Amino acid sequence: MSTVVDAAKNVFLTVRGRPASRRTIRGHKSEVEAVAFFKDSQRVVTCSKDTTLRIWDVQKGALIGGSFEGHKDWVRSVAVSPDDRRMVSGGRDKRIIMWDVESKQMVFEPLVKHTHWVESVCFSPDGKRFASGSQDFTVVVWNAETGAVITTLDSHRGSVWSVAFSPDGLKLASGSSDCSIRVWNAVNPELLFEIDAHKNPVRSVVWSSDGQQLVSASYGSVMFWNSSNGDQNGLTCTGHTDWIRSLDISSDNSFIAAASDDKTVRLWSTKTHRNIGQALEHLAGLLCVAISPDGKWLVSGDNEGRVWFWFLKNILKQYEAEVEQQRQLTNRTSKTLSTHLIQPSDRDSIIKKFDFLAINTTIRDAGYFHTPEELLVQEIDADNNNSDSYANRSIVRARIFDWDNALQDAVKSISIQPSLMGYISKGIALCGNDQVLDAMEAFDLAFVFSNRDPMNIDLLLLIKAVALFNAGRHDEAMRRVQDLATACQQLDTLSCRVVEAYLLVQLATIDFQSGQYNEAADQFTANINTITRLFLHAALLEPRWKIFTLLFGWDFDSLWQTVNQRRCDSLLRAGRLTEAVESHQYMMSRISDAAKDSCLEWSTSK
């Protein structure tokens, strides 16, 4: 299998002289539990369930010398000293070992203080102390030179999964299965304050390099906190669909990375708390992630023993280009952003029947949502009795999976003035919160405001089906769309076919993300001709379909390219080399010249 994959990669690497965006090495015999960079950004250390630690050359993606052996059970955590000369590791054997990097020998005998697994270790910025967190509910601060215990912090009510010193070394943060973060005085054994951070256990905590913020991860969410008083800063970062096991933050504070059991690493901007680019897809669940101090590399480890090396320059370069595109778009539309409702022009008369969705031009025109949300906040601050503004902001928040706040805004909109948009936004938010029965009631109430227009009613039925699909009711949603295509009179079946095709692509993507590559490849292949007919011609401009972009973030413009790329990738990972090559050739022969550069960039990263 590996030979087939390597051969396929050689076919896809059509651009020379550019570093691959990703390399994968299986260096451990079992799952990779933790990863830490050296300050030189050239080396990284990993530790594993196989009881060893290994150091890697980042540029080459190759092991440096032999492994570090001394633990008697899983090695759960590792940290590198500020001078790169020592490492400390903690494990399931309840032991902590200080290592000399050059000699690969223990600096002193293993330290035994904890009575349960050691889940996290970290050095103080001056390297004179280190801290450890354990499933015995305690945090221990140690003298890094002698191995003596300095103090024990024991007020957590659950396992301590993560510990981190502040950049000035004066504070220590700990995240626990009791769902809290505690911030301690690192000089005196004093609890400064406690944050009731998440609804689920806190698996990882990191500091921003200026010490002003803490970032924490739990099930499916990342949150930012004011490190002085524990108040939440900004929006919750959502998008992961399973436990987030590990966090890291770039040394310049510009972005964070989170690794999850859902087989992806996601990047977020620390300023806007929005996703940067697409999720970095892996072959298995992830337990750890680290960003190099120079910001050029990201390394992740999965539960099958693979170490993944990601070259961030290509990823961030694409994001910067998208941000610049958004800036230009915002400049072009700045004169009309203050207009609350879409104002159809003569050339837009075709969509007059679909203007019942009073979508703010801010939502319609913007691709990155921090801009419209900020503007909608300003609208609400100026007039907090404007029901449309709350409904619009609910849609914005739903599209970034901020379901709780989306529902709150929808309810507020309806309380001010019941409306079609208010009930649609409420139905979408309730589906996102898995309150499907309540969501169906909200959508039923939305029909009251449809003016009995058959075309509006049919469109609302499609919106309802998509919301159900997004809530995980895939079979029911597909059945509703197919039944509507058979029964509808006023709305031609083309719109039903568009929605059905898009949902089928999403089903194939779900198979791909769950590792069912053969099934995904077959589904993508089955839809290629339909997607080509629907989206490469004038039908792409059908204005009614843009409503699904507004409500759900559907990207019709790049759908054809996305389907073809994922088809290639699925065939490649399924070991179907000949079909993968043919698929790639088909894509490149039909794609526009303007899009070929991005496709070649994608090919290079495979």
Image: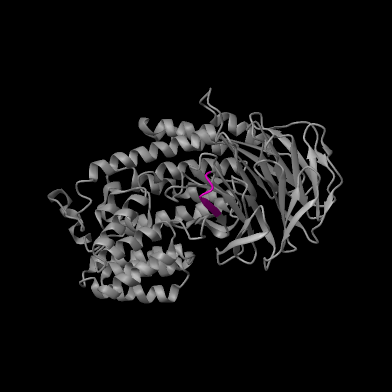
Place residue 47 in its image quadrant.
top right
Circle count = 0
Identity of the residue furthest to the front in this view: 188
Residue 512's x, y, as percent? 55, 50
Residue 548's x, y, as percent? 34, 57
Residue 549, magenta (yes or no):
no
Q: Residue at x 74, y 41 (%)?
A: 87
Identity of the residue furthest to the left in this view: 346
Residue 178's x, y, as percent? 63, 67
Q: Is residue 568 visible?
A: yes
- In the depicted view, which residue is nearer to us: 362 or 194? 194
Q: Which region is colored magenta?
A: 210-215
Q: Residue at x 31, y 76 (%)?
A: 445
Residue 171 placement, left or right of 331: right
Residue 324 placement, left or right of 85: left
Residue 230's x, y, as percent? 52, 60
Residue 432 placement, left or right of 422: right
For the N terminus, which image quadrant?
top right
For the C terminus, which image quadrant?
top right
